[in-house]
Amino acid sequence: MDIKRSQKRRRLRTLSTRIKQAARNGFELSDGNQEGWPKLKYACGNTDLFKVLEVKYTKTVPDDPLGPYCVRADLNPALARLNPILNQEVTNALTNHMPPCEYWTPVLIHQTLVKAIATVSGRIFVGPELCHTEDYLDTAINYTSELMNAIQAVKAMNPLVRPFLAWRLPEVQKLKNREELAVKFFEPIVKARRKAAEDPNYKKPDDMLQWLLNRSASAKDQSTRHIVKMQLLLIFAAIHSTTVTTTNVLQSLAVSPEDVEPLREEIRTVLADHEGILSSRALQKLEKLDSYMKETTRFYPPEFTSFSRETVKGITLSSGQYIPPGSFIETPSHAIHHDTANFPDSNTFDGFRFYKIRQSGGAAVHARNQFVTSNEQNLVFGYGRHACPGRFLAAAEIKIILANILLGYDFKNSGEETERYRNHEIGRVVSSVQAET
């Protein structure tokens, strides 16, 4: 992608099944069946996740509900309060990671965005002491790919010898070394904060690391390593997924110049109505941008399936189909998103599709068609009470980043390329990492 400053402003068994069928049959879902997790009846998300990520050998995901709980209970309610920090971090990150672009300049947009998003998310996850350090940023950017490499190496090994030899795989060792490095640079911060908390007048930092420390005070495992594992899980869940969505939006806009000006005009109008600040309330008013983001994830999803679970008890659907215990189930979200019964002209990309839908209905229609909304027709973030809890932070980050880029830069495909760059498809995962804008 070529960018310049704007002239206006310088598995083994998989059963794909409809969500509605599961809902009608009273699925009771959980994210685990260990102590502290809600009791489940039919299907479990964590056992599926543990097997997909080969947690037995990679030792990555802590079997602890504290991380997701902190996102729901602490992070999401704090987003309005943290909005000024998000805005400042986005401004700084784009200044630091985008080239000057006074003239048309080739930019590997995914690689540029992942650095910016790692910094911005890191400010919320770990606070100002760590988010700009080289060690943390290297971990935030590379941990996900290192984990995926380790998983692939384990899965390629004969299952009979995995318990004896998987730990010796170079990819697994590299992952272990990454965790050791993270413990090393987290340890001084964790110790300093715990020591400072002994002072009754200490003003605790307002970030995810502190919320985890606050809530882990009564937990069985209070070690720095346990905190680090939860932080690494945040990195795995948040950094690259947010980057891919932002990249995909820019890839679509790069070949749809007619869509750029309506978005810019909306951003300018909203800024004028909110004292020039992209506050949380202002972000909610960016309905065209919200629509473009939602249509992008509908048409170019990060994965072809969603709502992955392992059944722990047999269940018979209303269709008569029996799903035995131990089966992996997932919903064909890509097929649902391209079903003409759900979305007319579903095989055509229309960035303002959801904006037009929201304008045509009342409050219920408006709420149902927002970027962060999860329902039986919109499955990018999962479905039900276990839908991705971090989607609200992701939405805020993406909107602020896109608003800054739209107002600050012009962009197009590099060279003579006029078609949208094709996303890479790897199994059920879709990536856009090779895009150059």
Image: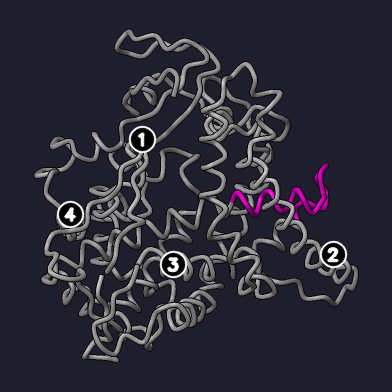
Q: Quadrant of residue 270?
A: bottom left
N-term-proximal mark, 3 vs 2: 2
Residue at 57% over, 40% down: 150
- Alpha-carbon span between mark 2 and mark 4: 51 Å
Percent across and percent down for residue 222 are 82, 49
N-term mark: 2 or 4: 2
Residue at (27, 52) in percent of width and height: 369
Whether pointer 4 and pointer 1 mark residues with C-beta atoms closer than 8 Å, the reply is no
Q: Which residue is mark 1?
A: 427
Q: Alpha-carbon neighbours of circle 3 within 10 Å: few (<14), some, or many (≥20)?
A: many
Closer to the camera: disc 3 or disc 4?
3
108 drawn magenta? no
Of residues 14 and 199, the one nearer the viewer is 14
Nearest to N terminus: mark 2 or mark 1: 2
Residue for badge 4: 357
Q: Position of residue 30 (x, y in %)?
A: 56, 31
Pick the residue in front: 18 or 38. Answer: 18
**Which callout, 1 or 3, points at the residue further toward the start of the chain?**
3
Mark 2: few, some, or many residues within 10 Å (few <14, many ≥20)?
Answer: few
Q: Which mark is residue 397?
A: 3
User: Which residue in the structure is indicated by mark 2?
Assistant: 191
Badge 1: few (under 14), some or many (20 or more) residues near its Cα, within 10 Å?
Answer: few
Calculate the distance from the C-alpha at mark 3 to the C-alpha at mark 2.
Answer: 30 Å
Q: Which residue type does callout 1 highlight?
A: Gly
Q: Which residues are magenta?
A: 214-233
Three-letter amino acid code at the position of disc 2? Lys
> For the residue marked with disc 3, what is the amino acid?
Glu
Above-or-below relation of 368 to 239: above
**How far separated are the C-alphas under marks 3 and 4?**
24 Å
Q: Secondary structure at mark 1?
A: loop
